[in-house]
Amino acid sequence: MLKGTKHSEEAKRKVGLFFKGRKLTEEHKRKVSEALKGHKTSQETRRKIGLKNKINSLGKRNANWKGDDVGLESLHIWVLYRKPKPKFCTKCNKRPAYDLANISGEYKRDVNDFEWFCRKCHMESDGRSNNWIKKGSKMWMKRRKGNKPREE
């Protein structure tokens, strides 16, 4: 084949089928290894390889992808990479946003089902602030039975 010409798609398929499943001998592996010793790849080539590997390992292409059958922590990490964190809480717009809060309570793999809240707004939206009472300067958690505060 002349330099600069390219194989047709049919030729590429035939070559691929010819070499598919072929085992290389140890001697051949050694010769290839020796031929590549001292070969330096350029920074541009390294960047391209790294980018290709990153693209092929994200999302559904990753061998460990679990789809919707994912744990809460992994789901939050997935959303963290896709939902930008605002400077302030999206509910009160007063305090800095700290928590990624699930809106529907179903924990589905949907970025729009999560919001950035401050801690107070997050606890209020989850109903957790109702479980706390103020006694003096300390916060006490209500008991489930009888709603009496814990004594230490």
Image: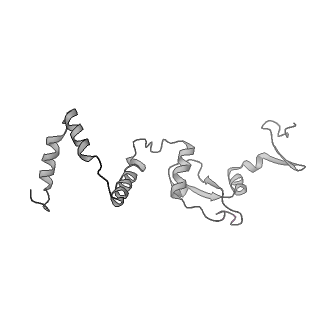
Q: In this view, does 22 lie above or below 112?
A: above
Residue 23 can be seen in this image: no
Q: Is residue 12 above or below residue 66?
A: below
Quadrant in which the N terminus is drawn: bottom left
Q: Which residue lies furthest to the front in this view?
A: 38
Residue located 14% across and 59% down the image: 6
Q: Position of residue 119 (x, y in %)?
A: 70, 55
Residue 44 is drawn in which quadrant? bottom left
Q: Which residues, given as a range, are shown in magenta?
A: 88-92
Colouring mode (rainbow / by chain / secondary structure / one colour): one colour
Asked whether 91 falls inside the magenta stretch, the response is yes
Residue 78 can be seen in this image: yes
Residue located 21% across and 40% down the image: 31
Residue 33 is drawn in which quadrant? top left
Left or right: 58 in relation to 120: left
Q: Where is residue 18 in the image (x, y as percent from the top left)?
A: 13, 41
Q: Is residue 6 above or below residue 30?
A: below
Q: Where is residue 69 in the image (x, y as percent from the top left)?
A: 48, 41
Q: Position of residue 36 (x, y in %)?
A: 26, 47
Q: Residue furthest left?
A: 1
Secondary structure mainly formed by the magenta segment:
loop
Camera-side residue of 23 and 38: 38
Residue located 71% across and 52% down the image: 123
Asked whether 13 falls inside the magenta stretch, the response is no
Camera-side residue of 80 and 41: 41
Residue located 15% across and 54% down the image: 9
Quadrant in which the C terminus is drawn: top right
